[in-house]
């Protein structure tokens, strides 16, 4: 899953950055330059807990960190930092922008609804659950009928020969 997550995440990430650059042409340079630094380690889904720890070599502009951010959340964090940078008189360095990206990356999914826990009786009596059971039973019956028909065909073929 990890290779697929990274490969597909990179594709979606750079497509998202291109879309953001088209939508915000005044921020395009910061979006693409900053976004490129994160491009080697971004996924469709986040892997591991987010951390603000990273290594950045100012000479080679190589960035590394030990978790994989979601491409959607990361691209939005990059857009936020590019927007902040555009409003500053003295522009941020790459290191400062990276720190801002890690600081503004969403740490938790937020939900306004509380988790609903159902009892076993509520699950068993739920119409969706019943539909799944009925579909599974129907599928099982159809498989048995198909096997029976296959045997009958074999017998008919055998008797005719």
Image (spheres, helix red, strand yellow):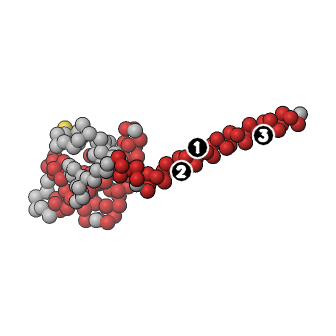
Q: Nearer the viewer, residue 137 or 114?
A: 137
Q: Nearer the viewer, residue 132 or 94?
A: 132
Which one is earlier in the sequence, the residue at label 1 or at label 3? 1
Taking the spot 82% from the left edge, 38% from the top edge, the residue there is: 156
Pointer 1: what residue? Answer: 140
Q: Secondary structure at mark 1?
A: helix
Judge left or right: residue 81 versus residue 141: left
Taking the spot 34% from the left edge, 64% from the top edge, the residue there is: 22
Judge left or right: residue 93 versus residue 30: left
Distance between mark 2 and mark 3 Cα atoms: 27 Å
Which label number is shown at residue 153?
A: 3
- Please, is residue 156 above or below residue 75 in the view? above
Whether the residues at callouts 1 and 3 have beta carbons within 8 Å, the answer is no
Which one is earlier in the sequence, the residue at label 2 or at label 1? 2
Pointer 2: what residue? Answer: 135
Whether the residues at callouts 2 and 1 have beta carbons within 8 Å, the answer is no
x and y percentages locating residue 124 in the rendered image: 40, 49
Q: Secondary structure at mark 2?
A: helix
x and y percentages locating residue 115 in the rendered image: 25, 53
Q: Residues within 10 Å of mark 2 (few under 14, many from 20)?
A: few
x and y percentages locating residue 13 in the rendered image: 34, 51
Looking at this view, name the residue that lies furthest to the right: 161
Residue 154 seen in render = yes
Taking the spot 14% from the left edge, 53% from the top edge, the residue there is: 92
Q: Quadrant of the C terminus?
A: top right
Taking the spot 78% from the left edge, 40% from the top edge, the residue there is: 153
Numbered disc total: 3
């Amino acid at each position: 899953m990890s290779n697929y997550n990274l490969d597909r995440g990179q594709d979606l990430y750079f497509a998202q950055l291109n879309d953001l650059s088209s939508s915000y042409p005044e921020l395009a340079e910061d979006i693409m330059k900053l976004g490129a630094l994160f491009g080697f380690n971004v996924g469709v889904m986040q892997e591991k807990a987010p951390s603000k720890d990273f290594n950045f070599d100012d000479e080679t502009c190589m960035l590394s960190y030990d978790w994989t951010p979601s491409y959607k959340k990361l691209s939005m964090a990059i857009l936020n930092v590019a927007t902040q940078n555009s409003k500053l008189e003295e522009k941020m360095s790459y290191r400062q922008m990276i720190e801002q990206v890690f600081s503004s990356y969403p740490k938790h999914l937020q939900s306004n609804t509380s988790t609903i826990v159902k009892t076993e009786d509520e699950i068993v009596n739920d119409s969706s659950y019943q539909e799944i059971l009925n579909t599974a039973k129907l599928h099982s019956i159809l498989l048995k009928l198909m096997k029976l028909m296959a045997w009958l065909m074999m017998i008919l073929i055998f008797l005719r020969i």
